[in-house]
Image (tube, rainbow, N blue to C red):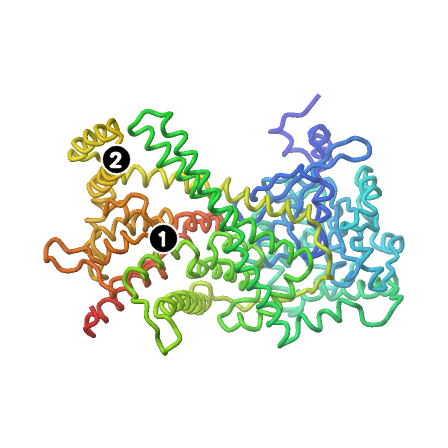
């Protein structure tokens, strides 16, 4: 007879575990795969699970949750959970907090794993066995996968897996995730019921030992931490003083008070007590590595010879700059045909589906709202896929860590680490994949700073606006005899975005995101040949996650903007619609297009969006903008390049684009109805371009920032900050230019 769930919590620990046993037997076995960064953990996960994977986020944080299913030799099907990389269970980042919480059973969305599969890089055991020691101390079953044995042999290392297994008290299976050797033995080890490892004898200072034992005695006998080594839980509570307090929330209030009191007492008795645990472990690790690892060839390895070139103070940055130039160009060149193809397909879908629907609001909603909104989302996918293709190749090959090491010297000047460089560089193509690429940044403040400055990089969506305004108002003449003025203006716009990003980062790291400079320890992993299966799975997951999450927000915004630009209907439209029906009946194609453009212009001018443009005109008038520019600014929040098509609609030019001579001429010769003077000038165009450099006008970017920060606070802060900077800079440009007699 089963015990009611509401009475289980009242039972002693032993009876509680016995009562929960039937539920454990019905639940699929959960295996958590843990390991340090660059240990080949993701490659092994992909090999074991194949395509049977799902990607989401842990509730409350932006840490990726990657799970898959594995069929073991006995036919049993288990769930495999890929945890983020970490060097220890003392968390210093959101990723490491999640690892600790899952392995201690305090992560609400994930049950305590039945088995931990620990992946170790056999070429650098001295840095990875610390995590192994901590996992053994937890008291839960562990299987150790000694990965990269083929690389170790190539570097002249012979690791004694049997000796290592006897020392740590857990099964140690030598494998190679790259070649697949040893995976059968690993599956067999996972299929067996692995007993918990034997307790580890600690050697700590007497005050620390007494404090941990005292805290262990007051820990509750029921709750999420039951079944773990009580001494280890006590040490984890004493040492956990990070920004996250999820572990402290897992214990009663009386235990929290005891933790605070014991910490204060240890601070007085042994001021350096926090360093005693790792020092003791690393002494044991040095001895273990010395006994279990034999170097057969003491000469310099090929990896060290390559690193002497790739991490050189002069050649390293030059080679890295060349590689980044290739990636930067590829994101543009390779993605353009795919993006054009997707855009053509979306337009074709609209042309096919449109005639199947009755003319009127339904057709407009489906074609101009839903299909156009989906197209705005899907068009970004090629850039995201190509970016993560290169990032995954660099990461799997081991070069990404070298790139961060090279750029760390330059990025330190504004308070960031070298890992921020690649996301910022990729943001020149699109801020969305650049923001998503900040997941490689461990430090929370550095990651937030990089996310907030990424939109300052002039993305490809700004290029149509730049091209239109430069072509219409900047004369095509040479400066200094060899530089074209339009090219110089375009270069200045990109440079302005970079300088703004540097300035904002410098301010943020000294104000809102001020904090101690983190110790950025970089491990240079061995070079490996990337596994295309793993690379393509990563690209698929990243692109799919973008479409699934950010796409829903963008689609909703696109439909809202369609409604604002289409309603209310103006009385002047009805006579135009009658003329349109007559022209269609007579087959006058040119007249049909002209009347359709007039209908679009009249509808937009008197729509909610048009009224909003007139409403904000007093705010944007000091920048040189009128209500027509105001409509374009509002519509560009869906996507910056929408500004071009909006201006074409306002001037009844239909499908004109940034290269359209008619639209350039319309803007160049447009008149102010009140004064008869030119409505726009080169100074206004310069002011508008400056506004576009600094303003946050992309709802997809805002949606991704919301997703990556898991809060609306930072997206709202970013929108207010960037748009305030844009207004002030445009005001200075326009009013300063007028004061100098330039406009």
On the rendered structure, is 183 left or right of 23?
right
Front position in the image: 283 or 648: 648
Q: Quadrant of residue 409?
A: bottom right
Mark 2, secondary structure of its residue:
helix
Residue 473 in the image, given as x and y percentages of width and height: 27, 63
Q: Single out the mark in the foreground, 2 or 1.
A: 2
Residue 696 to residue 478: above or below: above
- The answer to whether 712 is drawn above or below residue 348 in the figure is below
Which of pointers 2 and 1 lies earlier in the amino acid sequence?
2
Spot the residue most to the front. 587
Q: Which mark is residue 138?
A: none
Res. 592 mark: 2
> Is residue 34 or residue 478 the one in the foreground?
478
- Specify whether residue 297 is in view: yes
- Give the quarter of the image for residue 720: bottom left
Q: Quadrant of the N terminus?
A: top right
Question: Percent from the top left, x then y, of residue 350?
Answer: 40, 34
| Mark 1 lies on residue | 697
Toward the left, the furthest residue is 675
Q: Can you say which quadrant of the picture contains the C terminus?
A: bottom left
Q: CA distance from mark 2 to mark 1?
A: 33 Å
Residue 382 location (% of width, % of height): 52, 48
């Amino acid at each position: 007879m089963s015990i009611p769930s509401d009475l289980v919590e009242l039972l002693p620990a032993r009876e509680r575990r016995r009562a929960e046993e039937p539920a454990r037997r019905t639940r699929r076995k959960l295996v958590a795969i843990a390991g340090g960064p660059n240990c080949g953990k993701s490659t092994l996960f992909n090999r074991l699970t194949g395509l049977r994977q799902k990607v989401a986020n842990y509730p409350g944080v932006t840490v990726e949750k990657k799970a898959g299913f594995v069929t073991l030799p006995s036919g049993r099907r288990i769930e495999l959970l890929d945890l983020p990389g970490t060097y220890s269970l003392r968390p210093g980042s959101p990723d490491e907090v999640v690892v600790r919480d899952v392995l201690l059973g305090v992560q609400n969305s994930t049950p305590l794993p039945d088995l931990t599969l620990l992946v170790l890089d056999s070429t650098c055991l001295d840095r990875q066995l610390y995590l192994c020691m901590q996992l053994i101390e937890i008291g839960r079953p562990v299987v150790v996968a000694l990965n990269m044995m083929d690389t170790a042999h190539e570097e002249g290392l012979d690791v004694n897996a049997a000796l290592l297994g006897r020392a740590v008290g857990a099964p140690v299976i030598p494998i190679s995730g790259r070649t697949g050797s040893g995976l059968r033995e690993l599956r067999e080890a996972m299929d067996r019921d692995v007993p918990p490892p034997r307790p580890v004898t600690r050697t700590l200072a007497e005050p620390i030992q007494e404090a941990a034992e005292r805290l262990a005695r007051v820990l509750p006998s029921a709750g999420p931490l039951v079944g773990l080594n009580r001494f280890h839980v006590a040490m984890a509570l004493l040492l956990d003083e990070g920004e996250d307090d999820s572990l402290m929330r897992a214990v009663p209030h009386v235990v929290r008070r005891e933790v605070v009191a014991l910490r204060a007492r240890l601070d007085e008795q042994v001021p350096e007590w926090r360093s005693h645990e790792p020092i003791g472990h690393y002494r044991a690790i040095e001895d273990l590595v010395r006994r279990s690892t034999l170097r057969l060839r003491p000469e310099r390895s090929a990896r060290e010879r390559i690193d002497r070139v790739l991490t050189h103070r002069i050649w390293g940055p030059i080679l890295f700059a060349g590689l980044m130039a290739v990636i930067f160009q590829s994101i543009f060149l390779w993605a353009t045909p795919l993006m054009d193809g997707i855009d053509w397909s979306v337009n074709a879908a609209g042309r096919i589906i449109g005639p199947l629907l009755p003319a009127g609001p339904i057709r407009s909603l489906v074609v101009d709202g839903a299909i156009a909104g989906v197209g705005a989302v899907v068009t970004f996918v090629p850039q995201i896929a190509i970016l993560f293709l290169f990032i995954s190749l660099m990461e799997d090959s081991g070069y990404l860590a070298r790139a961060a090491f090279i750029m760390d010297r330059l990025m330190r000047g504004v308070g960031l680490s070298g890992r921020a460089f690649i996301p910022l560089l990729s943001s020149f193509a699109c801020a969305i994949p650049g923001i998503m690429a900040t997941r490689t940044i461990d430090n929370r403040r550095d990651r937030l700073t990089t996310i907030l400055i990424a939109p300052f990089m002039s993305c490809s969506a700004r290029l149509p606006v730049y091209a239109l305004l430069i072509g219409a108002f900047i004369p095509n003449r040479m400066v200094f005899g060899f530089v074209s003025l339009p090219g110089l203006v375009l270069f200045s716009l990109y440079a302005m975005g970079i300088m703004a990003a540097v300035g904002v980062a410098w301010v943020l790291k000294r104000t809102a995101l001020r904090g101690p400079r983190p110790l950025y320890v970089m491990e240079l992993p061995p070079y490996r040949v990337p596994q295309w299966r793993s690379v393509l799975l990563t690209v698929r997951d990243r692109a799919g996650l973008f479409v699934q999450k950010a796409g829903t927000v963008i689609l909703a915004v696109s439909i809202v903007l369609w409604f604002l630009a289409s309603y209310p209907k103006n009385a002047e439209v009805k006579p135009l619609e009658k003329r349109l029906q007559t022209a269609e009946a007579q087959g006058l194609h040119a007249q049909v297009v002209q009347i359709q453009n007039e209908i679009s212009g009249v509808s937009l001018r008197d729509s909610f969006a048009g009224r909003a443009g007139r409403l904000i005109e007093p705010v944007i008038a000091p920048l040189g903008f009128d209500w027509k520019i105001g409509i374009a600014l509002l519509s560009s929040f869906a996507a910056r390049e929408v500004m071009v098509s909006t201006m074409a609609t306002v001037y009844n030019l239909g499908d004109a684009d940034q290269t359209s001579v008619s639209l350039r001429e319309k803007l160049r010769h447009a008149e102010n109805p009140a004064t008869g003077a030119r409505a726009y000038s080169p100074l206004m165009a310069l002011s508008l371009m400056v506004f576009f450099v600094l303003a946050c006008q992309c709802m997809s970017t805002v949606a991704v920032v919301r997703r990556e920060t898991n809060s609306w606070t930072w997206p709202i802060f970013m929108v207010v900050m960037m748009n305030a900077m844009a207004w002030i800079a445009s005001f200075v440009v326009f009013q300063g230019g007028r004061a100098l007699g330039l406009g």
